Structures are given as structure tokens and as C-alpha cells.
Amino acid sequence: MSYPRELLENLYRAMVRIRLCEESFVDPILSGDVRCPCHLYSGEEAVSAGLCASLDDIDYVFGNHRSHGHFLAKGGSMQELVAEIYCRETGCSRGRGGSMHLIDPAVGMLGAAPIVAGTISLALGAALASSIRGERRVSVSFFGDGATGEGVLYESMNFASLRKLPIIFACENNLYATHMPIRDCRVGNSIHPIAEPFGIETAEVDGNDVLAVYEAGRKAVDRCRTGQGPVFLEFLTYRYRGHVGPDDNIQGSHTDIRPKEEVADWLRRDPILNFEKHLVEGGLLDEGTLQRIRSRAQEEVAAAHALAKQSPHPQTKELTKYVYQ
Amino acid sequence: MSTSRKLQYSLALNEALHQMMESDPSVFLIGQGVKSPWYVGNTAQGLLERFGETRVIDTPVSENAVTGAAVGAAIAGMRPVVVHPRMDFMFYAFDPIINEAANWYYMNGGKASVPVVIWGIINRGGEQAAQHSQALHSMFAHVPGLKVVMPATPYDAKGLMIAAIRDPNPVVYIDDRLLYRQEGEVPEEIYEVHIGKGNILKEGKDVTVVAVSYMVAEAQKAVAALAGEGIDAELLDLRTVKPLDEELLLASIKKTGRLVVADVGWKTCSVAAEVSALVSENAFEYLKAPIRRVTLPDCPAPASAVLEKVFYRDSRDIVHAVKQVITKNNVMG
């Protein structure tokens, strides 16, 4: 399979922007400059980069608590993301939402929320809206393996399948629901078969291979757009950082809850390094191009932090401003 | 061109849905039993035939996902009405209603509103016991970001449904099946009853009776009975329980100096409690007697009709409460 150079650059750029942006929060979190709970996405970049590349601008995305990557990949502004994480008025949610509430309706990023599985039904509703209006717009619901323990996922799959709604259930299986390894949460590690009884097309995808994600996404989007009903995709991936914050722990308890060998194994499967290798060794993009993309992203991240830190806090007199429209 | 015409409460609601679906293609009705009179009475009659299954969506029993779908569709630009034929089942939908819909506009810094109507039907009485008859309005009224309306008359049933559909915020619309056969004047045209505005149904000078939903009908009987005994009661129908019409409430108390609140919910943390607190905070010096609340006791609804008789409140309880505050005339000067 050969891909246009522009697409390959875009996929690489999307992943690098997310990684560098995520890692840029480590120090501010440790120093206390960033205080809202940050669920870092490092290691999982290929999922949102690949899947969002298969979408059009008009398509909808709903995220969860770990949505910095979803927001950036769908086209949300990095400046607004970083400012939101500093809880500033210039943030995408004007400092009222913080890291877990990211929205940019102009690019189809309709929102994110940390109630596990809470936005699955919202994405279902966006797909229903698309269906009622006779549009070909697709909705993507990003959720983690932990969300498969919530009943609303099964209600949503049933209803989506009944009405053949254009929704992609995108399960990012990073093997841990907060501190709980998947083997303690469910019988059997494999998640994607849960969609089968609902008559939903379902597949397991290497979530660290951005081209595999993109291919699976394209097929799923095509199926949704042509009215063939929903698709469930399970992306196998891994988060490098903790459930929340930089450390591999649930803050306040023990550290290093994941086996060192397991972490090392996943680091060898790094989605960005492996894609770089694929691009350079295949002669698809040269190292200079990749270096330029990395430098630009690094500058963008630094500028976003500088701007965020200079941005005003929300005004106290506006505490209740957005309770009602 | 308002015309004088009488309509049943349920048909007034039905007319609101017909007219709003006709005039706005983004309005749709979704919920369990919208095809079935057994569930929603005649409130949905003719809608399916007229607007089809694309916009009149009967659903499996999945309150959480279906309500979430209505909320999500609203975020994506639609104006859904999601119905819960027994509001007891709405507990399954508290997450999309409270965590998501109520908070959405605020926690996203005003970037996306949620113009959804969440319609819950109370099924008071009928030996239906604890899980088929609850009135949950106070729980919703507690939550910032939600508006809560409770029409007591056919006129308000139509006007508040239209206002709720047009409102950019999530509105919880609560009625009671016992109200459905009530008849009253209902204009044929589209009109709104302003959310947040109460209504003085009868002016009076001796005592203010504040009532909501089904208790408005009981309060009307009570006020008529009291008039026969020379007590001139003012009757205030709240119509909206969030936000409360503080201005109208306080003006009435300043006139009468006495308050009885008749609510359809339990006593603790009720709308009646909130009304009482507002008056205590803002018009204490005008009160001539302690406030009385006529509410359900803090007890689950019983099945037995014998127990129901003492569980539910009616006009006699309101009359009794009014007489208590009138005789306390001198207690507080």
C-alpha cells in the first residue's frame, strides 16, 4: 500500500505534536504550575492520529478523560489546549473545564468528559442527529478498556445497530483501568468480540501502528458513511505515563504498579519511533523532513506554554457566567 | 388571533409537539413507548403518522443511552424531546442529565449549549407503590444548569413545552398523568409560557398558598373552601421550580404575611423547603406566622389504597395548614 507524501507527513506530525505537547506537561505538573488532573496520552498517539486522519472535518468526535490527543488530532488548537490545562480564560473551555473538558465545535471536537463511558451515548446522539438530518457525517466515540465495564456502552451499541447509526466505537485498550490490570477487570483480554452479539462489525487493530489504524479507520468510516451501520474498533496500545499525572501510579499510593518488562516491551513498540523507521528505511520521507516536523512542533509547544502562562485567569465576577445560556 | 377553545391537558401537550415538529425540523421525539398510548396517553397521538419513524423514535428500555443520545443530538444541533413515561426510571439517566447536560455549557466555557427537553411523567397514586409514582423534581432543581418546569394547567402544558423546546438550555419538563384529563382554555397558535415565571391564579390578602403541579388543583379547591369561611387566600402556581419566581413570591408574601407551600414531593430538601427558605431569608420581617409545608411524608409511596390515603396530600391538608397559620396570627406580631 502506498500513501501520498502529504498524508505520511500529516500522520507523523499529528503524533509528534501530541507526544511533545503531552511530555511538556510533566515538569509543570511536578512543579505545581499545572494543577488540574492530567491524563497523559504519551504512547497512544497512533490511535487518534490514524483514526482522525480517516475522518473529514465535519465528522464528530467525543473524548474522555484522556483526550488531549483526540483534541489535537481532530484539529483543535494547541494554544487553546495548553491554556485550558493552565485553566486560563484563553483556553478552549475558558478555564472552566481544565484538562478533562476539551471542545472545539468548529473542527467537530464536540467535547470530552471524565465520567467513564459518559460520552459514548453523546456520540451516539450526534450520530442520530446526523442520521435524522440525512447527512453522511460520522461520529467517533473514544473510550478506554475501563469503559467496557459500564452498561451504557452495551445500550449504545444495541441502539446504534438497531438504527444503523454512523458511529465508530473506538476502544483504546491500554490494558489498565486506572490501577486495575485488564485481567482483574474482565475474563479474557480481548474486547472487540463484545460488539458481535449486536451485529456490529468489529475488529482488533494494532493501535501502535499508525497506518494500520488509518486503514481500519478508513474502512470503518466508509461503512458508516454508506449507511451500513456502526463499527467497533479495539486498538491495542499502552500509556507510558500513569493513569493521571506523570508517574506510573495512582497518586498517593504505590509506584511502579506495572511490570518493568511490560513497560520495556511497549517502549520498543513506540508508535512514533517505529513509524520513523518505516518512513526512513522505506525511503518515504527523509530524516531532514522528520527533523523539521519535530522542530516545528517543539516550537509550537513552547510558544503555547509561554502564551498560556501570560494569559489571564477567568475573572471572579464571571464565576456563574456560563451556568445558563 | 387568539381563539377561545377548551382542550385537555394531554392534547394541549400533543398540540405543542405537533406544532413544534412542524415548524422546526430539528425537533424530534424519542423515548420508550412514544408509539404507545399505554405509555404516554394521547400526548403523542398522530405524531408518528405525520412525521415518521425518523423523528418519532420508540426505543428499547435503555434510559441511560437513550437520554444520552438526546443530549448528544442536542450538542450536535438538534432540539430533542426525550420522554420518560415513568420518571422513576430516570434514575438510570441521571448521568447524561446531570453530569453531562446540566454541566456541559459551563464546563465547556459556553462553547456548546444543550437544547434538550427531558420530559418525565409522575404517576401519582393508583396503588403503584414506590417505584412507579415518585416525583423527582427537587432532585433536578438542585442542579445548576438545569431548568425545571411543572405545568399544572392545559394552557401551561402547551406554553411551557414550547418554551422548553425553544430554550437553549436543558429543561426538565415534569407533568403528572393525573393532570391529563383536566380541561382548560388553550389558544390554537404557538405561544410560550415564560420559564421562570409563576402565576397568581387567585388574588387574596390573608395568606399565600404556593402550589406546584398536581397540588395546584388541590389548592384551588382549598382556596374556594376557605373563601366560604371568610379567609381570602392568594394562590400562586409556581409553574417553574427552577429558577423560582422569587419576585412574584416575595411580593405576595409582603402582601399577605403568611405562607403555605403545597408540593407534590417529599418534605426533606423539597421545593417547598426551598420556597420556605427564600421567604425566610428575604421577607422574614413580613411574616406574621410560621411557614407551613404540605408535602408527602418522608416515606416511600405505599401500594395499599388505605395507606395511600394518608400518604398523599389533598385540599383538606391545605385548608388545615392555612387555618394553622391564620390562628398563629399573633404569635409573631
Image (cartoon, rainbow, N blue to C red):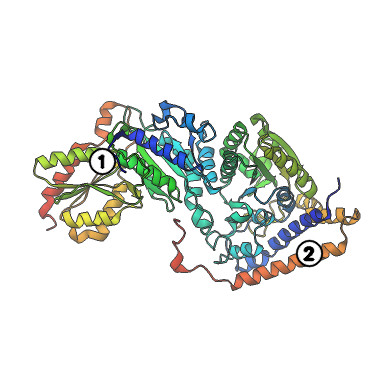
Instruction: Give above or below for B175 relative to A242.
Output: above
Instruction: Give above or below for B20 relative to B38.
Output: below
Which chain contains the residue that carries disc 2? Answer: A
Query: As rendered, which of B300 and A136 lies closer to the eye?
Result: A136
Examine the image and state in which quarter residue B333 appears. Answer: bottom left
The CA distance from mark 1 to mark 2 is 68 Å
Front of the two marks 1 and 2 = 1
Marking on residue A245: none
Residue A48's x, y, as percent? Answer: 70, 51
Label 1 residue SS: helix
Residue B154's x, y, as percent? Answer: 31, 38
- Could one spot residue B70 in this view of the protein? yes
| Image position of A94 (left or right of A196) | left
* Residue denoted by label 2: A294
Residue B110's x, y, as percent? Answer: 51, 58
As drawn, which residue projects farthest toward the bottom?
A: A310
* Residue denoted by label 1: B216
